[in-house]
Amino acid sequence: MTHPTTFKPGSDADIHKIDPRHVEGDWDKESAAAQIEENTAKSRELAYKLYAEDRRALLVVLQGMDTAGKDGTIRVVMTGINPQTFQIKSFKQPSETELDHDFLWRIHNAVPRRGNIGVFNRSHYEDVLVVRVHNLVPEDEWRKRYDKINAFEELLVEGGVTLMKCFLHVSKEEQRERLQSRLDEPHKRWKFSRADLAERLLWDDYQKAYEDALTKCNTKDAPWHIVPSDRKWYRNLVVSQLLLETLEGMDPQFPAPEAGLDGIVVE
Ligand code: AMP
Ligand code: MG
């Protein structure tokens, strides 16, 4: 279908060697759109079964540089999934209350409940990305977080939560174009933030922080996927495919109905 997105646990996540414009095979925008629709329809059925089964949950983690398309991916890939079975959580700068707790406190609280799919738009990975790049905590503190994240994700997996972690990989040039269009197109201006320009200057530091996070937290049970994201339609195709494959792998089942229902007539 699409190309493999995972890499071997223990090996380096060489994102600089992966082309953000990559497209596998002869997909194009039109064929991708049709396939996304088919994938979403199938995912919807499986999400409904997961909800009925009410035993396990799926957590989709979306990370990427500014403009990588976290919001757009959610809009396109999750459209059509029953909202009752599904929650989205966007992580912003931590509040004062959140900062009074350990970094995983707000995260754990947002993990989807049994039967649900949860999407994290940014996540606990910010605590080894923006936090590292801006020295928001001392180095000896953030360095310990990779192991803590792995232990936390292991806890989730053992508790019946499947993780699907996606890094939306855009190039610096593509980011430039997308930021520029937020300035040039009036209906996109609301998305523009001067802070994004300051972050862009730290591009190399962020790429390094991403490589480390993806390398250190790429475990067998909670692998990272690297999604080429310069072409929005390919990014959406890959994520919709991953969502479907993940749900198929979980293989949710309707619970067995009560015994002895045959022949009951409702008066
Ligand atoms: P946006 O996703 O564009 O709404 O921006 C959210 C902002 O919150 C980004 O600049 C993130 O880097 C920032 N953010 C998210 N999580 C954290 C965190 N744990 N510590 C500091 N900043 C964060
Ligand atoms: Mg932003």
Image: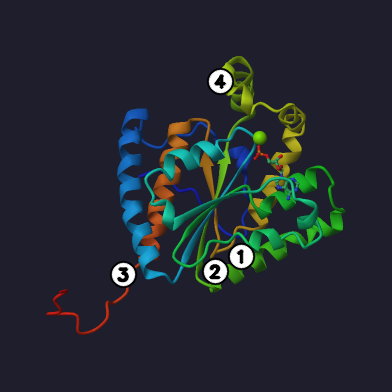
- Residue type at mark 3 is Phe
How far apart, in angstroms, are the residues tagged by discs 3 and 1?
A: 26 Å
Whether residue 76 is situated above or below residue 177 in the rendered picture: below
Q: Residues within 10 Å of mark 3 (few under 14, many from 20)?
A: few
The x and y percentages for residue 221 are 54, 65
Do the residues bearing badges 1 and 2 touch, measured as CB atoms within 8 Å? Answer: yes
The mark found on residue 153 in the picture is 1
Residue at numbered disc 4: 187
Kind of element beneath mark 4: helix
Quadrant housing residue 261: bottom left
How far apart, in angstroms, are the residues tagged by discs 3 and 2?
A: 21 Å
Mark 3 or mark 4: which comes first in sequence? 4
Left or right side of 137 for 228:
left
How far apart, in angstroms, are the residues tagged by discs 3 and 4?
A: 44 Å
- Residue type at mark 1 is Glu
Do the residues bearing badges 3 and 1 touch, measured as CB atoms within 8 Å? Answer: no
How far apart, in angstroms, are the residues tagged by discs 1 and 2?
A: 6 Å
Kind of element beneath mark 2: helix
Residue reaching furthest to the top? 184
